[in-house]
Image (cartoon, helix red, strand yellow):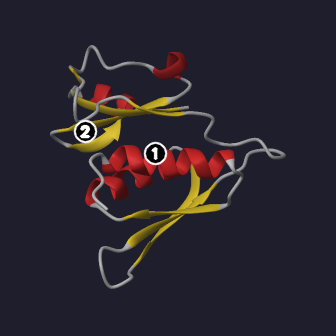
Amino acid sequence: MVITDPIADMLTRIRNATSARHSTVDVPTSGMKKAIAQILLEEGYIKAFDLVENGAQGMIHITLKQNKGSEKAITGLRRVSKPGLRVYAGAEELPKVLKGLGIAIVSTSKGIMTDKKARELNVGGEVLAFVW
């Protein structure tokens, strides 16, 4: 099966797993997906992730995080830049998600990072996704 937008597939798998209250989710591996998983880990949206070799492409095994009680750590995920319509923003125009409560994941010339880090480094790029 060919996936035309692997990042949207990853975000959809995470969104579906959190809605179904699963504790883990598996996503096919790529460099960009590893970077996105690392950002989600650093920002506290997931508990952990491991790389699992299965002979072919490999998988990223993501352990989802639950806040107090059964409240989900990730309440929303949205893909912004799509293959049919790319969305770019300069350092000054980077969006703030929920007035700073969420994060925007941005692909810059210095790597994949959050909108806050991109503003610090004064770099713009492609706005991949919003997480809140």
In the rendered image, the vertical position of residue 43 relative to residue 61, given as above or below: above
Q: Residue at point 57% right, 52% down? A: 46
Q: Tell me which corner region of the image, top left, top right, bottom left or bottom right, holds residue 93.
A: top left
Q: Look at label 1 and name its amino acid.
A: Leu
Looking at this rendering, what residue extends furthest in the right direction?
69
Estimate the x, y position of residue 72 in percent, counting from the top left: 70, 43
Image position, residue 55 (x, y; %): 32, 85
Outermost residue on the left side: it is: 109
Residue 100, given in percent of the width and then of the height, sits at 51, 21
> Looking at the rendered structure, which numbered label has been put on residue 107?
2
Rendered image quadrant of residue 101: top right
Identify the secondary structure beneath mark 2. Answer: strand
Residue sitting at 69 percent across and 50 percent down?
20
Q: Residue furthest bottom?
A: 55
- Type of the residue with mark 2: Ser
Left or right, 42 with reference to 71: left
Name the residue nearer the viewer: 3 or 111.
Answer: 3
State which mark lies toward you, 2 or 1. Answer: 1
The residue identified by callout 1 is: 11
Which quarter of the image is occupied by the N terminus?
bottom left
Asked if residue 44 can be seen in this view, the reply is no
Q: What x and y, as percent, mark residue 2?
A: 27, 58
Q: Residues within 10 Å of mark 1 (few under 14, many from 20)?
A: many
Q: Is residue 101 visible?
A: yes
Q: Secondary structure at mark 1?
A: helix
